[in-house]
Image: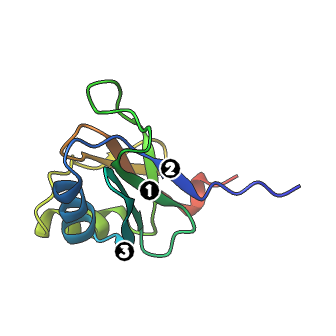
Amino acid sequence: MDMKLELVPIPVSDVDRSIAFYRDVIGFHLDHDVSPREGMRIVQLTPPGSACSIAFGTGFGLPTPDESVITGLHLVIDDVAAARDELVARGATVSGIDDMGGVLYAHFRDPDGNSWSLQEIRVGARP
């Protein structure tokens, strides 16, 4: 049986601000932004090259940032330094790079406090 993680809902307080952050600063693709009925808005964005998307919006039961945040989402990449430099150039605040025994990390948060890690697994760190 295949199990594919393809969508992660995240809590946000301002849908338009979050679209601007994820699309314009982080570089995710805006898949859709729909309002199927009054009071409901569903937005889905996907990181470049990913099969898994994020979703947020209003009126469909997601927790608000006051209720919770998502922590530790990972974007697995080939070159953490290049990715970090690109995000910083786009206006993101990204931590320095930490080497955890051949697995490199840099971290950032969205405007609501949801946390992300850029992860590069070097060849020598793979099993």
CB contact under 8 Å: marks 1 and 2: yes
Residue located beneath label 3 in the image? 29
How far apart are the alpha carbons under marks 1 and 2?
Answer: 5 Å
Q: For the residues marked 2 and 3, what is the alpha-carbon distance in whole angstroms?
A: 15 Å
Viewer-closest of 53 and 99? 53
For label 2, the SS is strand
Give the class, few, some or many, for how many residues have Cα within 10 Å of label 1's Cα (few <14, many ≥20): some
Q: Quadrant of residue 77?
A: bottom left
Label number found at residue 38: none
Question: Which residue is drawn at the image coordinates 29% and 71% (left, top)?
Answer: 27
In the rendered structure, are the residues bearing label 2 and label 3 in contact, judged by CB atoms less than 8 Å apart? no
- Which quadrant holds residue 51? bottom right
Q: Secondary structure at mark 3?
A: strand
> Quarter holding the N terminus?
bottom right
**Secondary structure category for the residue under label 1:** strand
Image color mode: rainbow
The residue lying toward the viewer, choosing from 86 and 124, is 86
Q: Is residue 37 visible?
A: yes
Q: Is residue 78 left or right of residue 96?
A: right
Instruction: Report the residue at 24% width, 37% height from top.
Output: 113
Q: Which residue is mark 2?
A: 8
Residue visible at 23% across and 53% down in the picture: 15
Real-space Cα separation, disc 1 to disc 3, in angstroms: 10 Å
Which residue position holds label 1?
Answer: 54
Amino acid type of the residue that numbered disc 2 sits on in the rendered structure:
Val
Give me the residue at 22% from left, 41% from top.
Answer: 13
Q: What amino acid is labelled 1 in the image?
A: Ile
Question: Is 84 situated above or below 63?
Answer: below
Mark closest to the chain's N terminus, 1 or 3? 3
Query: In the image, residue 74 lies at what x, y percent?
Result: 45, 50
